Amino acid sequence: MQSRRFTAASPKKRRGFTLIELLVVISIIATLMSLILPAIQNAREAGRRTQCLNNLRNVTVAALNFASSNKSRLPALGYFPTVSTGSGPARIMGRSWALEMLPYMDQQGTYDRWNKDAAFDAAPNLQLASTLYIEAFACPNDESAYVTPGGLSYVANAGFGDGVVITNNLAVPEHSFSAESMDWDGDGVVCDYLAGTYDPDDAKITQATGVFWPEFEVSGADTTGQQPQIVTATRNGSATVGKIYDGSGNTLMFGENLNAGGTNWADPRTRACGFMVPVDAATVNGTAAATSLQNIHNMIGIDASTSQRYPAFPNEAKTGPEGQRPYLNSNHPGIVVVSMCDGSARTISENIDESVYIKLITPNGTRLRNGIAVESPLSADQF
């Protein structure tokens, strides 16, 4: 009898990743992710930057349209009207430039509902501004303003100031070309609201340093010295389109500020709706302040007891209370989005030369007034 030998079938070999192969695959994936993620982030940032540029361009066009309907005059930085009260006439914090943009940004209905005889933070205005989100007013990189009712990311060019917040008393113009204590002509007389002194030559030179200025109406509190004259001089002293002698394409109109808005986009205080350059008023004395980097860079306030350096240049002051830092800053890496008085929008580097930045702020800094020019002309290839 023939016997058969049965042989056991050999088991099939299982194929899989060895530990080395697995580590190689993981390293390849990690390498690809390190290449792709920054590209995705850069693409997202480019999109946010483009949206911010478009927003600021729309706001700027609205301001120019306002000017074309108001004898070429741009809106006031903030409006501080005088209204009748039970104790007599009193000045109130009315509204910022932002409200004046609404009819030119498809928000005529909101503008018509605004009560100009009430403060921005009183009924019904507070409810109106604090609950309304206007997309064109907010940069997508500004977490405090983007998709936030009442949010504001953009501020207006408010020129030079003495860097001193006198008080929140509405009887005192907080920031006005006719109340800033800078002795440009060196004659020993300055514009000082509290002291009631006024120098029209200094006022005109200060006015030439900014595009937007607040409008104050004379109230019953304006009784000292030349106070009524000082306040009357501020009746919409903003720039006139067509009379920006430094060049509309060389002059900033709006820019970003992460701390803009304060209470909401209608807050008229300079710290909330404007950006400015604080100058050491005690050391101007006829010196061309815009070309004196000691005056501009040190940023020491007029009060001799303080040694604080104001962070006035782009991206130097990103943190701070809302509505308290009137300087340009943004969350765009290395830049700030700005618009020019010709209606264009662009970016400027946070490393921009300080004297060039100062010149970009002034609309009429190169114009001679009584033999004094605040600054030298700016070349287009300098920024």
Image: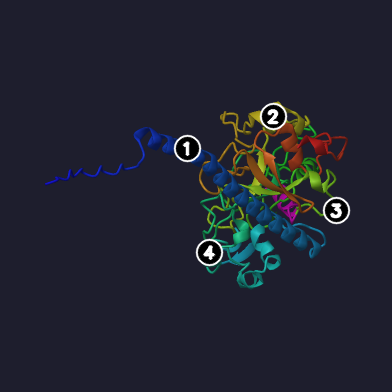
Q: In the image, which disc is placed on residue 242?
A: 3
Please determine whether, in this image, residue 187 is positioned above or below residue 120.
Answer: above
Q: Nearer the viewer, residue 147 or 100?
A: 147
Q: Nearer the viewer, residue 5 or 118?
A: 5
Residue type pointed to by label 4: Leu
User: Which residue was labeled with disc 4?
Assistant: 126
User: Quick check: is 225 in the magenta stretch?
Assistant: yes
Give whichever of discs 2 and 4 has the lower sequence position: 4
Q: Quadrant of the C terminus?
A: top right
Q: Nearer the viewer, residue 358 or 197?
A: 358
How crowded pointer 4 is (Cα within 10 Å; few <14, some 14-19, many 20+) is rated as some
Give whichever of discs 4 and 1 has the lower sequence position: 1
Residue occupying the far front of the picture:
1
User: Which residue was labeled with disc 2?
Assistant: 295
Q: Residue at x 31, y 41 (%)?
A: 13
Residue type pointed to by label 1: Ile
The Cα–Cα distance between marks 4 and 1, rounded to whole angstroms, is 56 Å
In the figure, is residue 212 to the left or right of 244?
left
Q: In the image, which disc is placed on residue 28?
A: 1
The Cα–Cα distance between marks 3 and 1, rounded to whole angstroms, is 60 Å
Q: Are marks 3 and 1 in contact (CB under 8 Å)?
A: no
The image quadrant of residue 151 is bottom right
In the rendered structure, which segment of residues is drawn in magenta?
A: 224-236
How crowded pointer 3 is (Cα within 10 Å; few <14, some 14-19, many 20+) is rated as few
